[in-house]
Each structure stands twice: as structure tokens, then as C-alpha cells.
Amino acid sequence: MKDPIEKIKDILDVLRQDGPWNCGSYSRGLYNGIELAYSILVGKNPDYKKKPEPGLFVAKKEKLC
């Protein structure tokens, strides 16, 4: 059975891929909240995601979420 900290890291690995975290403010907030919890548990500074600049996804007008 995986350690709870490893499980949180696995979730972050999925959420930090293009698509989940930059689909909207809810997903970005979810990522940042889990990143905060993880950083507290492992004793590091959080690496928050900021609102992405319009670019590839906006230009193609793809609906990712």
C-alpha cells in the first residue's frame, strides 16, 4: 500500500499535465490546494500554477474540459 504522501504526489503528477490545471480556475485552484498540502507535508515551498496566457488552446478553440 502506498504512503499517503506518495498518493498526493501521484495526484499532482496527473493534475500538472497540460489540460487538467489550465482548464479553468476551479481545476487550477484544486491543483494549487493539493500542491500546498503536499508542500507542507514534505517541507518545501509550493509551486503554484498561475493563470495561463492565451495561447495554443485558445488559438485552436479546442474544448478540453
Image: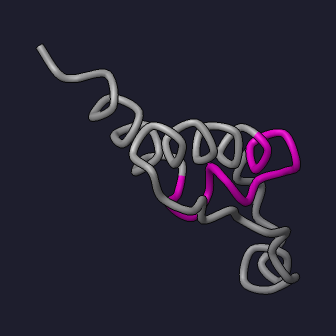
Q: Is residue 22 left or right of residue 6?
A: right
Determine which quarter of the picture holds residue 3.
top left
Determine which quarter of the picture holds residue 5.
top left
Q: Which residues are magenta?
A: 16-29
Dominant SS of magenta comes to loop
Q: Position of residue 23 (x, y in %)?
A: 76, 53
- Give whichever of 25, 33 is nearer the camera: 33
Residue at figure coordinates x 68%, y 62% from the top left: 48
The residue sitting at the top extreme is 1
Q: Position of residue 14 (x, y in %)?
A: 43, 46
Q: Quadrant of the N terminus?
A: top left
How is the structure coloured here?
A: one colour
Q: Position of residue 40 (x, y in %)?
A: 54, 42
Q: Quadrant of the C terminus?
A: top right
Q: Is residue 18 left or right of residue 22?
A: left
Residue at figure coordinates x 49%, y 41% from the top left: 38
- Give whichever of 27, 5 is nearer the camera: 5
- Give whichever of 56, 22 is nearer the camera: 22
